[in-house]
Amino acid sequence: MRALLKSSFVRQFAGGFALGALGLVVLHPAEAPSRYAPTAPVEAVR
């Protein structure tokens, strides 16, 4: 188990995961623009 935790594969995987998570946080827009009105009318279909 100790050898697995010290392997370069696990280190690279964890580093890539951390960079990906950081990229999602940094590059995520505060609020995505919407093509639709914020209060679009909803009609029930029966």
Image (tube, rainbow, N blue to C red):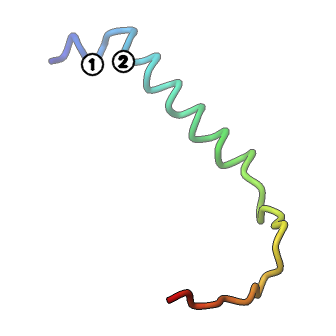
* Residue 24 at x, y percent in the picture: 64, 44
What is the number of the mark on residue 10? Answer: 2
Q: How crowded is mark 1: few (under 14 residues within 10 Å), some or many (20 or more)?
A: few
Position of 43 compared to 9: left or right?
Answer: right
Return the mark for residue 5. Answer: 1
- Looking at numbered disc 1 in the image, what kind of residue is underneath it? Leu
Relative vertical location of residue 1 with respect to residue 29 in this rendering, above or below = above
Question: What residue is at 27 percent from the left and 19 percent from the top?
Answer: 5
Label 1 close to label 2 by CB (< 8 Å) = yes
Q: Percent x, y for residue 36?
A: 82, 73
Q: How far apart are marks 1 and 2 (CA)?
A: 6 Å
Q: Which amino acid does label 2 sit on?
A: Val
The residue under the point 42% across, 18% down is: 11
Q: Residues within 10 Å of mark 2 (few under 14, many from 20)?
A: few
Quarter of the rendering occupied by the N terminus:
top left
Helix, strand or loop at label 2? It is: helix
Query: Where is residue 32 drawn, in percent x and y?
Result: 78, 62
Q: Residue at x 59, y 31 (%)?
A: 19
Q: Which residue is drawn at 81% across and 67% down?
A: 34
Residue 23 position in % (x across, y down): 67, 38
Label count reads: 2
Q: Is residue 3 above or below residue 40?
A: above
| Local SS, label 1 | helix
First in sequence: mark 1 vs mark 2 = 1
